[in-house]
């Protein structure tokens, strides 16, 4: 929106990515006067590539009449044992999508005049009856602030400074490769599967097809999304990998095109630990990127008239395939609680927190358990 000064709002949402748009859309559909404020300017670009489709997200998209989500499908889960070439298969249908596809559905469904780009939200005063927030120097009163400002949430840090980011001891190398850049043999092998490769170093890799450029899903136009989890000790080893091409020390992720040459060379060398076909997709990928695996679990999601939602609340490990669906479920539950207890926001927030806090904690624990199991499995 070409931005004018925003007058007071009923509900302000800080962050206009997936969680912020889920919250904005669900609250709007429930009849609230809600505005979303996003720090970045323009449409957001890809984060995280492939996403496994979960029912909570589909339920929210359907409830808000969003344009259909573009998805790909598979019927088989395949697990390959290291470089042996041997694999096992099970019938396990799954749908996949991409960050871009989810963002496009949510953004297209949300009214432009309620989405304010280039606005950074800060809390001025968190009172019992509402919250005074500042958006790029302009103050406004809101009855509620929904903080959906992501895994490095400054709002969470200001409300619960004791909440720490725990490095899990391993990173994810990630990438997407155009199907057209792969041989027919590789495409045929991975088509219709969610494939895993258990490596001998305490890690594993996985891949699946996602929509391609322009959200096209026809064979030949899709992308193959892959992730390779690998142990890296905290300290010098991690710092060396997380220092980007320009010498900047990154904490959470090294974006596409910014991985330093030494890290990339060592990474390519290590593809010998992978099944040949996995190694080929990794080596064909132009710009892999890195995500440090972390756990974040705040003690509460509600602080006065501010609530934390999506990654701003709990950061769960990617093995759960539940981060985006958690954001959607947080948002749907918030809209439901406020609609039921609308006049009494305090009661509604208490009910919402009682429902969502244990789920966030359980998902963090589940991610830790899955991570430990897969690291052990790989190390065998
Ligand atoms: C590399 C990577 C890979 C991922 N892969 C998967 C996956 O495979 N499956 C899955 O389910 N999830 C995945 N996720 C997580 C998933 O993308 C998120 O859980 C989901 O998108 C919800 O994110 P979010 O909206 O809470 O936070 P973000 O997407 O981080 O968005 C936060 C937004 O808030 C804005 N912002 C920050 N501060 C302010 C402020 N003060 N005021 C206004 N705006 C602000 C930021 O600019 C940003 O747009 C991945 C994440 C990453 C980083």
Image: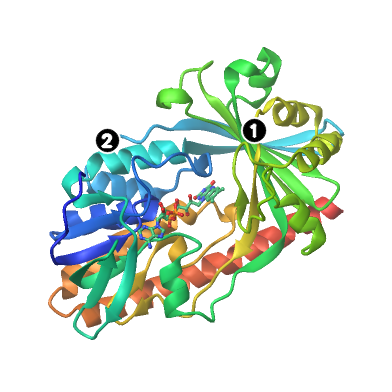
Mark 2 nearby-residue class (10 Å; few <14, some 14–19, many ≥20) = some
Mark 1 nearby-residue class (10 Å; few <14, some 14–19, many ≥20) = some
Seen in the picture, residue 117 relative to 133 is either above or below; the reply is above
Percent of width and height locating residue 194: 61, 36
For this orientation, the residue located farthest to the bottom is 128
Percent of width and height locating residue 324: 44, 52
Q: Circle 1 is placed at which residue position?
A: 287
Q: Secondary structure at mark 2?
A: loop
> Mark 2 or mark 1, which is nearer to you?
1
How far is mark 2 from mark 1, CA to CA?
30 Å
Percent of width and height locating residue 42: 33, 41
In this picture, residue 21 sits left or right of residue 1: right
Establish whether ligand 1 lies closer than 8 Å to the Cβ of label 2: no
Percent of width and height locating residue 204: 74, 46
Which mark identifies residue 67?
A: 2
Seen in the picture, residue 301 relative to 25 is either above or below; the reply is below
Q: Secondary structure at mark 1?
A: loop
Residue 104 in sight: yes
The residue located at (83%, 40%) in the rendering is 266
């Amino acid at each position: 929106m070409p931005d004018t000064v925003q007058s007071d709002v009923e509900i302000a949402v800080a962050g206009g990515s997936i969680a912020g748009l889920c919250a904005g859309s669900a609250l709007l559909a429930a009849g609230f006067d809600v505005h979303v404020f996003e720090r970045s300017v323009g449409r957001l670009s890809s984060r995280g590539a492939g996403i496994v489709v979960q029912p909570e997200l589909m339920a929210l998209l359907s409830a808000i009449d969003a344009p259909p989500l573009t998805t790909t499908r598979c019927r088989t889960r395949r697990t390959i044992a290291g470089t042996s070439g041997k694999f096992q298969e099970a019938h396990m249908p799954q749908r996949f999508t991409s960050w871009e596809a989810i963002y496009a559905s949510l953004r297209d469904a949300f009214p432009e005049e309620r989405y304010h780009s280039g606005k950074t939200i800060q809390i001025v005063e968190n009172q019992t009856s509402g919250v005074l927030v500042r958006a790029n120097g302009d103050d406004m009163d809101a009855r509620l602030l929904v903080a959906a400002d992501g895994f490095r949430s400054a709002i969470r840090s200001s409300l619960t400074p004791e909440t720490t980011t725990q490095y899990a001891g391993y990173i994810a190398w990630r990438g997407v490769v155009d199907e057209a850049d792969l041989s027919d043999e590789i495409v045929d092998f991975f088509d219709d599967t969610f494939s895993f490769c258990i490596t001998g170093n305490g890690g594993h890799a996985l891949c699946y097809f996602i929509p391609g450029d322009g959200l096209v899903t026809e064979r030949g136009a899709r992308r193959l999304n892959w992730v390779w989890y690998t142990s890296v000790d905290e300290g010098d080893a991690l710092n060396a990998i997380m220092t980007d091409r320009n010498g900047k020390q990154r904490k959470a992720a090294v974006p596409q095109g910014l991985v330093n040459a030494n890290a990339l060379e060592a990474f390519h060398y290590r593809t010998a630990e992978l099944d040949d076909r996995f190694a080929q997709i990794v080596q064909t990928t132009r710009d892999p990127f890195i995500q440090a695996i972390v756990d974040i679990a705040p003690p509460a999601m509600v602080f006065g008239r501010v609530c934390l939602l999506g990654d701003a609340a709990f950061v769960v490990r990617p093995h759960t395939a539940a981060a985006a669906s958690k954001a959607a479920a947080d948002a749907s539950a918030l809209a439901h609680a406020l609609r039921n207890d609308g006049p009494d926001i305090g009661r509604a927030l208490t009910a919402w927190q009682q429902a969502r806090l244990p789920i966030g904690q359980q998902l963090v624990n589940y991610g830790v358990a899955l991570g430990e199991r897969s690291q052990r499995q790989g190390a065998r």
